[in-house]
Amino acid sequence: MWALTALLLLVQSSGQAATLEKPILSLHPPWTTIFKGERVTLRCDGYHPVLLELRPINTLWYLGHLLLPSHKKSIEVQTPGVYRCQTRGAPVSDPIHLSVSNDWLILQVPYAAVFEGEPLVMRCRGWYDKVVYKLHYYHDDQAVRYFHSSTNYTVLQARASDSGRYQCSGTMRIPVESAPMFSAKVAVTVQVALFAASTGALSTWSQSPRSKSLKRTGARRLPPLAASGNEARGCNSQGRAPPWIRRPPPLQPHKLQPSLQVTSRSPSESPQCPYRSSPSPPSQTPP
């Protein structure tokens, strides 16, 4: 009887844990825009309780409000639209919007959100991977980079100012060199991240789906700031003890032995540290 009760409680707790975790929907290759006729793979990774592993796990797929017939963990798609997935006992995943283009030139950007400090990579593709010459990348209608032929544009450490609408242009030999062609404009948003040094927690100003699942997706967290030698001993970067450290009460002369000498110190003075630490870099603040 006790064993049956414990088993039911375990099943109930497992079901409650499953409802708290959204499945993670990923796209391979990781580009939101493809050419007409191409296929991409969608993968749904969700939380499965141990006891439910004894039964077959079904995955539900949605295209908009339409339920797709597949129940596999991964599916191949080529239809444009908004895709979501759902696993047993879990809520619906965050969406992925897939676009299909029939243009000669497309600009591909990552499907996942990009945070400050992370690299931002975008690719200008010619029709079915034809080489693009005299390639220009534009940010808010301003040319930001030029390449002689097909090359990805990479921002090594993205900032909030890198958000905006991007576009690319170039020529292709089909069979002779064509006039300059332009891709459609694509909106890119770089999300601002705040780092709390005291707790090591990472929070974002935007309420993106990815920001709510950093722990599950393995998103990088900034390491906690290491204290310098002086700070580890209770000293700040100016070589003095911080004001929140209590000083010992002044010695009372009448309680000292006659052989001891008493030296007074002004209350405004603070104990000096053994050495001064190098200035710490300014903390980043959100715009």
Image (cartoon, rainbow, N blue to C red):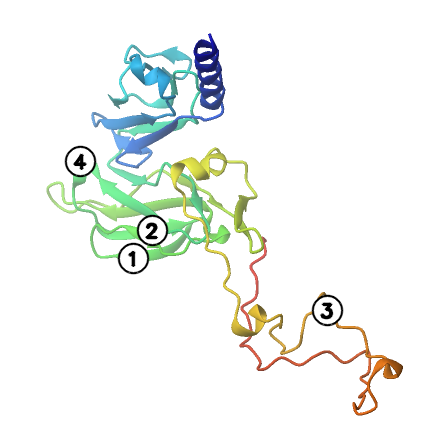
Residue 31 lies in quadrant: top left
> Which residue: 57% across, 74% down?
230
How packed is label 2: few (under 14 Cα within 10 Å), some, or many (20 or more)?
Answer: many
Disc 3 element: loop
Q: Amino acid at mark 1?
A: Tyr
The answer to whether 265 is drawn above or below residue 185 in the figure is below
Disc 1 versus disc 3: nearer the observer: 3
Identify the residue shown where x is 39% and y is 37%: 217
Q: Earlier in the sequence, mark 1 or mark 3?
A: 1
Which residue is denoted by mark 2 in the rendering? 137
Q: Give me the C-alpha separation between circle 4 and circle 3.
A: 65 Å
Q: Secondary structure at mark 4?
A: helix
Q: Earlier in the sequence, mark 4 or mark 3?
A: 4
Can the viewer see residue 207 in this picture?
yes
**182 vs 255: above or below:** above
Residue sitting nearer the eye, 226 or 127: 226
Nearer-the-camera pick, 3 or 202:
3
